[in-house]
Amino acid sequence: MQSLNVGDVLFQLFSLLVLFAIIVGVGLLVKRAVSTDRRLKRIEEKVDELKDEKGRDRT
């Protein structure tokens, strides 16, 4: 009969936590990239609006 070693259990838990951390880290990076992309689009729209307003004021 084999016994359950504490070291083996700890290693398995640590490995599972590392895998979980990698998955969560990738998810957070994707979320951050999407958020940054949305923010840049909003800023570009505002800059375009300001350019249009400035162009209309000159004419």
Image (tube, rainbow, N blue to C red):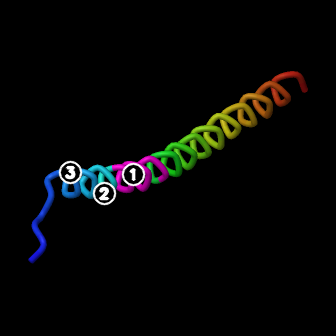
Q: Position of residue 28 (x, y in %)?
A: 45, 47
Q: Amino acid at mark 1?
A: Val
Q: Is residue 17 left or right of residue 9?
A: right
Foreground: disc 3 or disc 1: 3
Q: Is residue 17 left or right of residue 39?
A: left
Alpha carbon distance from label 1 to label 2: 12 Å
Q: Position of residue 58 (x, y in %)?
A: 88, 22
Q: Is residue 31 magenta?
A: no
Q: Amino acid at mark 2?
A: Leu
Q: Position of residue 55 (x, y in %)?
A: 85, 28
Give the residues drawn in magenta, as a range: 18-26
**Viewer-proximal residue, 59 or 11?**
11
Q: Quadrant of the N terminus?
A: bottom left
Q: Amino acid at mark 3?
A: Gly
**Mark nearer the N terminus (2 vs 3):** 3
> On screen, 47 above or below 26?
above
Answer whether labels 1 and 2 touch (C-beta < 8 Å). Answer: no
The answer to which quarter of the image holds residue 49 is top right
* Residue situated furthest top in the rendering: 58
Q: Residue at x 62, y 45 (%)?
A: 37
The residue carrying mark 2 is: 16
The residue carrying mark 1 is: 24
Q: Secondary structure at mark 2?
A: helix
The residue carrying mark 3 is: 7
Q: Residue at x 73, y 28 (%)?
A: 50
Q: Main secondary structure of the magenta part?
A: helix
* Residue situated furthest front in the rendering: 1
Q: Is residue 12 left or right of residue 6?
A: right
Q: Position of residue 38 (x, y in %)?
A: 58, 45
Answer whether labels 2 and 3 touch (C-beta < 8 Å). Answer: no
The answer to which quarter of the image holds residue 53 is top right
